[in-house]
Image (tube, grey):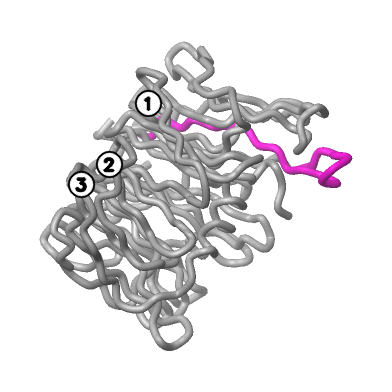
Amino acid sequence: MNSTLRGRGPRTIGSLAVVLLAGAALLAPAAGAASVRSLAAGEAELGYWTDTEIVIADGAGTQIRTFPDLPKFDLNGGVFAGEIPGKRRGAAHVDAFDIATGERLYRIRNGRLPVVSAEGRKVFFFPTFHRDQYAESVWMRTAKGRVRRVILFKAGPGFPGVPHGMSAGAFPLDIAVDEQGRTLAVVAGLEPLRAFDVWVVDVKTREAFRVTRGRNSHNPSLSPDGSQLAVRVESPDPCPDPLYGEILVGKIRLITLYTEHSEFLSEWSCDLYYDTPRWIDDQTLIAVRVTKDETEELGYDLDIVKFDVPTGTITEVVTEGNPCCITASPSLGKVAYMFSDRDGFAVVDVATGAVTDHPGNVYVPHLSGQNRL
């Protein structure tokens, strides 16, 4: 166990969040330089795609600024970072903007898939092949503007990097960070084989350790203080399904990093399981509950629930509209979600239960401070 961390105390319903998010992201075609235009005053809480552009809005849904269609973006602390495709295949860079003024703050060359953390002071990103020819690393731009590698997985015998023990290689697939960007969780493996595990990295020291070993853990979320990790553990055997043929269900595993304590908050079941764990505060997880229901069009009823981790109590948050594909922002105390059976998305304030609906052709909500890919 890392001593620093110890001291700091096939496409299925089971992977529905990943599938729909990825599919909606593809709706954003490649674009050139990121010009911006100011629309209204307000504090940036939300970003999303329309059919033509990216919209940044405040908590009431009022548009603040728009950006051109980009394949990937994130926002936090008034900073917007977007992936700008290059003219050549595989070439890209990340541009960061001040949302309030629209001015470009800086460019990260040979980078993609940005995750903005620490109230906009840090940006984690994946490399292009021009930066890392094997694409087996994750990088960060620090608060002082330095760009450095956070983790490199060993490409083979004689190569530098973290030994991973994955027979098909360990390519970074997904990342999550804590609120201050001090701890990084990385899913690495090979997606076509559905083989992946999770590593945790101390960002300052770059010490890394593997926290799962079943080659079936992914979809990580770190608690705001970085002390706890939630992951989705995928079942080894699919469940038969009359509509989809078969589905891969999952269960939520909770790992306390500084004690190495691990427990499951849910179990595998073909009729009821939980997906997409996301921390909303240091003691509460949000998740999608999936219940088999033949009266529903998809064959399943979807709800958003929260787990009180100390007690194990489960409370319903959203039960209408078959919500899915959630993302949570601890700093805002809000959860954004799409719907499995209609267009648009909504945002719920977890404390008050107030819901702001965003109907129509709008896609994949990004909350400020979500701290994950």
Q: Secondary structure at mark 3?
A: loop
**Where, by quadrant of the figure, is residue 304 drawn?**
top right
Q: Nearer the viewer, mark 2 or mark 3?
A: 2
Residue most extreme to the bottom = 88
**Between disc 2 and disc 3, whose residue precedes?**
2
Q: Amino acid at mark 2?
A: Asp
Q: Residues within 10 Å of mark 3 (few under 14, many from 20)?
A: some
- The residue depicted at 65 percent of the width and 42 percent of the height is 234
In this view of the protein, which residue sits in the foreground, 64 or 241? 64
- The residue depicted at 40 percent of the width and 77 percent of the height is 85
- The residue depicted at 43 percent of the width and 46 percent of the height is 365
**Where, by quadrant of the figure, is residue 65 drawn?**
bottom left
Q: Name the residue carrying label 3.
A: 77
Mark 2 vs mark 3, CA separation in Å: 12 Å
**Which residues, given as a range, are shown in magenta?**
237-257
Q: In the figure, is residue 331 to the left or right of 191?
A: left
Image quadrant for the N terminus?
A: top left
Mark 2 vs mark 1, CA separation in Å: 14 Å
Q: Is residue 242 magenta?
A: yes
**Between disc 3 and disc 1, whose residue precedes?**
3
Q: Nearer the viewer, mark 3 or mark 1?
A: 1
Q: Main secondary structure of the magenta part?
A: strand
Q: Name the residue carrying label 2.
A: 58
Count all numbered tags in the image, as a single digit.
3
